[in-house]
Image: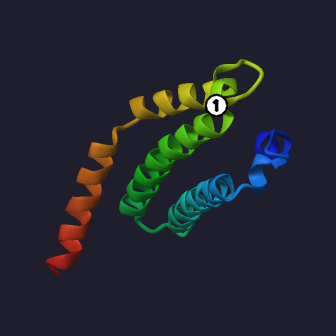
Amino acid sequence: MDYAQQRRAFGKPIAEHQAIAFKLAEMATKVEASHLMMVNAARLKDEGARNDVEAGMAKLLASEYCAEVTQESFRIHGGYGYSKEYEIDGSCARRRSADRQGTSEIQKTISAAAVARVQSR
């Protein structure tokens, strides 16, 4: 967001161009949705309830959105996305690290099995 507000093109910050503003809004929405799902899974755990489905769904959504948001960040930064001056390159490294903690397919398998159990009741 800082970069989009500072970088200027055609006489105004790129954050004020509709295409970039829409991307930023979508990115913020994805981050917030991921956060809310994580909070819900944590709340269930704090209450002593089972939360494996909610935690799996939160992890799936967050990891997918992380990849999308990071990719859009690279697009907004253009060539500067590869510069060590900005943190985008580190975001990709963290994303690759998250992949090793459990693939999206595993999270989908867990969620699918849980949804099937609920539907069969």
Q: Can residue 69 be seen in this view?
A: yes
Q: Residue at label 1? A: 78
In percent of width and height, residue 111 lies at 29, 59
In this picture the colour scheme is: rainbow
In percent of width and height, residue 42 lies at 55, 60
In percent of width and height, residue 35 lies at 60, 58
Q: Give the quadrant of residue 23.
A: bottom right
Q: In this view, does 57 lie to the left or right of 118?
A: right
Indicate whether 61 appears above or below 88.
Answer: below
What amino acid type is highlighted by mark number 1?
A: Gly
Of 54 and 45, nearer the camera is 54
Q: Which residue is at 48% across, 41% downward? A: 67
Of 58 and 45, nearer the camera is 58
Q: Give the quadrant of residue 88.
A: top right
In percent of width and height, residue 115 lies at 24, 68
Of 111 and 71, nearer the camera is 71
Q: Is residue 1 visible?
A: no
Indicate whether 83 appears above or below 2.
Answer: above
**How many discs mark residues in the rendered view?**
1
Q: Which residue is at 54% across, 70% downward? A: 47
Q: Which residue is at 66% across, 52% downward? A: 20
Q: Mark 1 falls on what kind of element? A: helix
Disc 1 packing (10 Å; few <14; some 14–19; many ≥20): few
Q: Which residue lies furthest to the bottom in this view?
A: 121
